[in-house]
Amino acid sequence: MSSKTLLNCIFVAEGKRDEERLKKLDIPYIVRTDGLNVPRETTKHLQELAKIHEVIILTDPDGPGQKIADKLLQEIPNAKVIKVIKKKAVKKGKVGIEHIPLPLLAELIKPYKQETFTTSSDVTLIKLLDLGLSGPNSQFKK
């Protein structure tokens, strides 16, 4: 069995469009909050992931985004928050990670893409997530 180098960071984003932007930058591990009311299952899932991975919070540079980051930091104090300059995330009067130019977003996440670990397992987090064996409500399938 050959060993693989995998990204050690789990990124937290607010919504689907933010997740899509991160995926364009080859970020495989993304957990969405789906807005301000972060489900308890999502928080518990992130707490478990934080035991072996670094959790990186990337929320919109606005009031709700800050509330989400603050709420997650209360539950996951060792998480890191990527600070985004608001004027870099505005397009047509709307604020969001989805509006940051991809090259700038790539620079913001670059330090975290370099944090990796090596495994010899052929079971990946993505496979577990795709099968529903990890993540919110996974206990029902296990």
Image: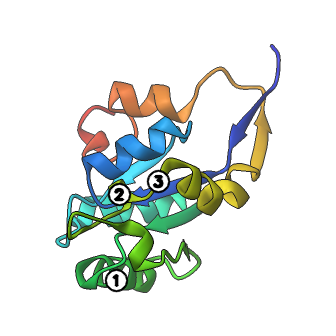
Relative to residue 69, is residue 80 drawn left or right? Answer: right
**In this rendering, would 119 be left or right of 93?**
right
**Image coordinates for residue 42, horizontal then vertical, percent:** 30, 59
The CA span between labels 3 and 1 is: 21 Å
Q: Which residue bears the numbered disc 3?
A: 101
Spot occupied by residue 110 in the image (x, y as percentages of width and height):
68, 55
Tell me which amino acid carries mark 1.
Gln
Q: Residues within 10 Å of mark 3 (few under 14, many from 20)?
A: few
Q: Residue at x 40, y 34 (%)?
A: 129
Q: Secondary structure at mark 3?
A: loop
Q: Residue at x 47, y 53 (%)?
A: 101
- Where disc 2 sits, the SS reads helix
Which residue matches tag 2? 99
The residue carrying mark 1 is: 66
Q: Amino acid at mark 3?
A: Pro
Sequence-earlier tag: 2 or 1: 1
Distance of label 3 from label 2 (alpha carbons): 6 Å
Cβ atoms at labels 2 and 1 below 8 Å apart: no
* Quadrant of the rendering where the C terminus is positioned: top left
Residue at image point 36% right, 41% down: 20
Q: Is residue 108 visible?
A: yes
